[in-house]
């Protein structure tokens, strides 16, 4: 038997495979007609009839209606007139009480007096004292007023020699310079208190109250044994009883720099005479001398 060519066999295999895979898809497609009858499709009418229910939309070219206008309210000008009212003189009334104590114009109340130490006070070493005034010290949490003297506040001024000078600040500065943050020994309670306590203190073997009175930086209180010391300081015009401390020395006059910038002091050797200045009408440059 004669064999078929290879290309014909290939074509037959391709046709068989196409029929196997494509035929099921054709079976699912709808047929062109039903029972041999043609199917006609009628377009849907989207036009709204004129007699349909509801209001017809306004025409596009119609102009919008203007908003309604309201008439302006008439105001009687006589209603704002002060004519006819009583216009008597102004009367001063009592000021209203302030809402708090901050509004009072009265000066602040003076600080409470220092509290004397009780019987439990014992000598205690206090470190790094700071003089807040000539007679008050803060150290190790204690606020101490030296007993036996009247504290000189920093804002006090003195007029022993006529012009006023800030003797309170000078007294505090002198007291600070003498202490120099050295430890002091005071009779204080075991624990620091918030109140200012009045007690005796010593720096080494020197009593703080005696040093302040002897140098004229504090006044002895009434009945204090330091009254005689204050009298001696007042007679010697020390501290607040005398003139203000001397000011800084005057600045030394320095020679003004010359054209060459030489700042050396003038020597004792004779200097050459300066050259004469030519007259304004002299020819330029001038002739050498």
Image (spheres, grey):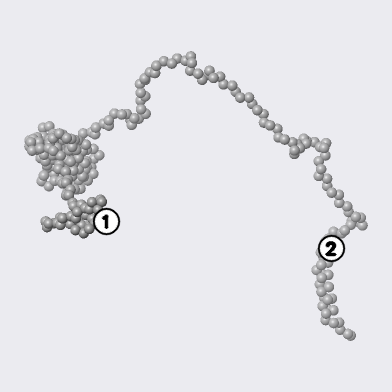
Q: Secondary structure at mark 2?
A: helix
- Point out the tag, 2 or 1, that comes first from the N-terminus: 2
Q: Quadrant of residue 259?
A: bottom left
Q: Which mark is residue 22?
A: none
Residue 69: x %, y % from top left: 65, 28
**Residue 283 visible in the shown view:** yes
Depth order, front residue of 181/37 = 181
**Residue 119 visible in the shown view:** no
Residue occupying image coordinates x 35% and y 25%:
97
- Dot 1: within a 10 Å radius of its alpha carbon, few (fewer than 14), some, or many (20 or more) residues? few
Residue 37: x %, y % from top left: 92, 55
Q: CA distance from mark 2 to mark 1?
A: 130 Å
Circle 2 residue = 27
Circle 1 residue = 284
- Dot 2: within a 10 Å radius of its alpha carbon, few (fewer than 14), some, or many (20 or more) residues? few
- Look at the image and tell me in which quarter the C terminus lies: bottom left
- Look at the image and tell me in which quarter the N terminus lies: bottom right
Q: Secondary structure at mark 1?
A: loop
From the image, state whether disc 2 or disc 1 is nearer to you.
Answer: 1
Residue occupying image coordinates x 48% and y 16%:
83
For this view, does 19 lie left or right of residue 176? right
Residue occupying image coordinates x 74% and y 36%:
62
């Amino acid at each position: 038997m004669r064999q078929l060519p290879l290309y014909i066999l290939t074509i037959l295999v391709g046709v068989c495979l196409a029929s196997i895979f494509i035929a099921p898809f054709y079976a699912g497609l709808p047929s062109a007609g039903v029972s041999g009858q043609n199917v006609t499709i009628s377009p849907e009418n989207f036009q709204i009839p004129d007699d349909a229910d509801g209001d017809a939309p306004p025409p596009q070219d119609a102009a919008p209606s203007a908003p309604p206008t309201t008439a302006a309210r008439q105001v009687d000008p006589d209603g704002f007139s002060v004519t006819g009212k009583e216009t008597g003189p102004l009367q001063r009334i009592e000021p209203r009480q302030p809402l708090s104590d901050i509004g009072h114009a009265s000066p602040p109340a003076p600080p409470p007096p220092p509290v004397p130490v009780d019987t439990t006070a014992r000598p205690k070493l206090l470190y790094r004292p700071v003089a807040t005034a000539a007679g008050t010290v803060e150290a190790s949490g204690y606020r101490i007023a030296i007993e036996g003297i009247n504290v000189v506040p920093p804002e006090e001024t003195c007029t022993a020699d006529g012009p006023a000078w800030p003797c309170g600040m000078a007294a505090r500065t002198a007291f600070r310079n003498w202490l120099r943050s050295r430890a002091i020994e005071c009779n204080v309670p075991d624990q620091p208190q918030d109140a200012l306590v009045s007690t005796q203190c010593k720096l080494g073997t020197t009593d703080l109250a005696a040093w302040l009175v002897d140098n004229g930086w504090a006044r002895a209180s009434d009945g204090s044994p330091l009254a005689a010391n204050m009298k001696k300081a007042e007679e010697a015009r020390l501290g607040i009883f005398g003139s203000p401390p001397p000011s800084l020395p005057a600045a030394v006059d320095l020679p003004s720099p010359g054209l060459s910038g030489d700042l050396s002091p003038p020597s004792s050797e004779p200097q050459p005479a300066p050259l004469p200045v030519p007259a304004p009408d002299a020819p330029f440059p001038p002739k050498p001398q």
